[in-house]
Structures are given as structure tokens and as C-alpha cells.
Amino acid sequence: MVINCLWVSGQFKGKGYSTELLNECINDSKKLKMNGIVVVTSNKVKPFLTDKKFYLKHGFEVIDSALPYFELLALKFNNKAKDPKFTVKAKIAECDNRKGFTFIFSNQCVFMKEYVELLNNVAKKLNHKTTTIKLASHIEAQNNGSAFGTLGIYYNGKFITHELMTEAKFEKLLQEKII
């Protein structure tokens, strides 16, 4: 089982809902006789990635890592099962397109398509070449770079960020890293 997003917001934080959601996921996974649960986090606190401390507290272990900061955590139910791992392409944080910006995303987040369009327009407005790739399957996600299948933003083939952001924040990122 893969946890793509486990998020409790605002007034609901600190009431144990995250643990309840995780416990439901664990129960569902066991009922389906799965080998365990995996989740992508990071080696430091990052937006849009659950803090790995939460998962470590619940018995997950780091089983793989990928540049620049991603970590794959697993809660194993079957110790004889083969460990999942990041693909080689994900580990090196590169995509095939070496010209301008590449936005690789999936619909794991309902807001993703809208935000990718906004960021794409910002890059074009600043005269950058852009390519957008919408992932349609887990096979495409495994073969297209980012360890975080929801979003990968690349410049000239190199991973920049997985972060969903406003137009203003993206423009600032461009000024700091690219322009």
C-alpha cells in the first residue's frame, strides 16, 4: 500500500486524527493481505511531505533515499517480502528533457493540474521553454524522474522542487535559482 497524502489541517490538528487515519490504512492493508505500507518523506521537514517523525513513531523505517532529500519509509508486515525502492532515475533527480522547464505531475492531488498550469504560464511569461507531462499510470511515474510522483519541477533536466506554489513564490524561486 502506498500513502500518497495523509494530511490533517488547521483546527483539526493535534486531536489524533492523523494516527486514526494511519491506523485505518494499516487495517485496510492487512485485510488486503499486503506486505506493508510505504510513504515518501524527506530527510528534513518540507512542504507537502509529512514529517517522517510521525511515521517513525508508528514503526516505519527508512528503506531507501533519492536526491536531493527524498526518503522512502516502510512499515513491513511481511519481512520476507522484497523491499520497495526508488528507480535509478528518481535517485539521480533528473528527467530526460534538457531544454527549459519540465513539469511532471499526476492527479494524486486535486489541485495539481491548476497549479502546474499557473507555473507553466509564469515560466513562459519569462520566456522559458516549457514541457508538461501528466502521468497516467504508476509505470509512467516510475520512469519519469521524481521520487515524489505528485509533482516534479525540473530545469534543463535537473530536479528543482516537488513543491506546489503560488505564482509569486515560483517567480521568486526563478530569480534565486535560474534567472
Image (spheres, rainbow, N blue to C red):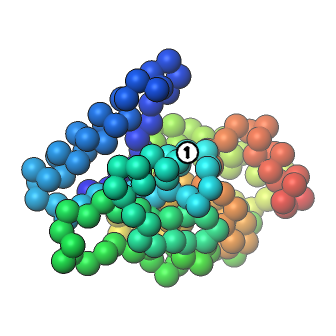
Query: What is the x, y in percent for residue 50?
Result: 50, 46
Residue drawn 59% across and 78% down? 92
Q: Residue furthest bottom?
A: 88
Occupied quadrant, residue 35:
bottom left
| Residue 20 visible to an observer of this rendering | yes
Q: Is residue 174 left or right of residue 152?
A: right
The quarter holding residue 82 reads: bottom left
Residue 157 lies left or right of residue 105; in this view the side is: right
Front in this rendered view, residue 98 or 124: 98
Number of marks present in the image shown: 1
Mark 1 crowdedness (10 Å alpha carbons): few <14, some 14-19, many ≥20: some
Which residue is found at the position 21% from the left and 73% from the top? 79
Q: For numbered disc 1, what is the local secondary structure?
A: loop
Query: In screen coordinates, is 35 left or right of 135?
Result: left
Q: Residue 100 vs residue 162: left or right?
A: right
Name the residue: 40% across, 24% down: 15
| Residue 36 spot, x, y in % from top left | 24, 61
Q: Is residue 135 visible?
A: no
Q: Position of residue 63 (x, y in %)?
A: 41, 71
Q: Amino acid at mark 1?
A: Phe
Viewer-proximal residue among 29 and 146? 29
Residue named by callout 1: 48
Up/down of 87 relative to 78, above or below: below
Residue 153 position (above or below residue 79)? above
Of the 4 image quadrants, the one containing the N terminus is: bottom left
Residue at x 42% of width, y 44% of height: 5
- Quarter of the figure with the C terminus: bottom right
Image position of 24 with respect to 124: above or below:
above
The image quarter in which residue 7 lies = top left
Residue furthest top as drawn: 11
